[in-house]
Amino acid sequence: MNRGFGPALVRSFSDARELAQAAAAYVARQAERALAERDGFRIALAGGSTPKALYAALAEPGILARVAWSRWQIWFSDERVVPAEDAASNYRMAYEALLGRVPIPKGAIHRVQTELGAERAAELYELELGADPCDLVLLGIGDDGHTASLFPGSPALLEDRRRVVAAPSPVAPLERVTFTFRALNEARAVLFLISGATKAERVAEVLSELAADRPLLPASRVRPRGSLCFYLDAAAAARLPAGTPPEEEP
């Protein structure tokens, strides 16, 4: 089912597997569009179990065969300040689920250098990211309404100059590196991936704030210059109001 909430298109799917398959097709379409217009496809990955299912779907033969992996540039919208081999590392998860299974050049995978500490890693990552916007940023929503590592009450919420900063987390790991709203909102497209009944109430709140143009939670402050999509499974979509028919599919 497709619904519109202010600037956001919302699509809901029967279960997490259907969501992952549809999200993989969406990412492939965004890559094709970017590569038809530019030299490369800049995508920022997210951590979490729902993006992990997407990454596994992208590595399946049907998608794998149609993707020009050699022209992708991989970034991370946030990272935990842990060693790259740590189980909590977003890089490790993405590498095991996708990056180590597809022919992306190693030099095109831009890992946050967490071994340097949060502040220095953020400084270097911002320099590496540069001013070119991402073609697609993947995000999720936490139970408190945070996205990337932009938590309620964080000083990172006030940053309007930098694109990458060190940010505290109320839950372990306590140090993070994150894209700021500047980097997120410069993106050509943002895709939120959300599954599970525990997220239903918060998702409804975020989308209501988007529709009313009264952003309070961090996730409802994401307003990219391009398209904004939410892909939900049925459990995550269970508390949504009716919404309105979307004008078109991005």
Image: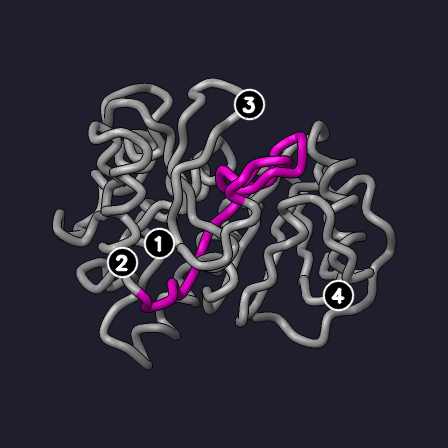
User: Are discs 1 and 2 less than 8 Å apart at CB?
Assistant: yes
Q: Residue 6's mark? A: 4
Was residue 143 drawn as part of the magenta stretch in this picture? Answer: yes
**Badge 4 or badge 3: first in the primary sequence:** 4
Q: Main secondary structure of the magenta part?
A: loop
Q: Secondary structure at mark 1?
A: helix
Q: Would residue 48 be counted in the magenta stretch?
A: no
Three-letter amino acid code of the residue under disc 2: Ala
SS at circle 2? loop
Q: Position of residue 203 (x, y in %)?
A: 72, 42
Q: At which x and y percent is residue 236?
A: 70, 38
Q: How is the image coloured?
A: one colour
- In the picture of the structure, the residue carrying the numbered disc 2 is 65
At label 1, which amino acid type do we have? Gly
Marks 4/2: CA–CA distance: 35 Å
- Viewport quadrant of the C terminus: bottom right
Q: Return the x and y of residue 171 as percentages of the image width and height.
A: 53, 20
Q: Which label was assigned to residue 200?
A: none
Of callouts 4 and 2, which one flags the residue occurring earlier in the amino acid sequence? 4
Kind of residue at disc 4: Gly
Residue named by callout 1:
62
Instruction: Check the image and report above or below for 101 versus 126.
Output: above
Amino acid type, residue under disc 3 in the picture: Pro
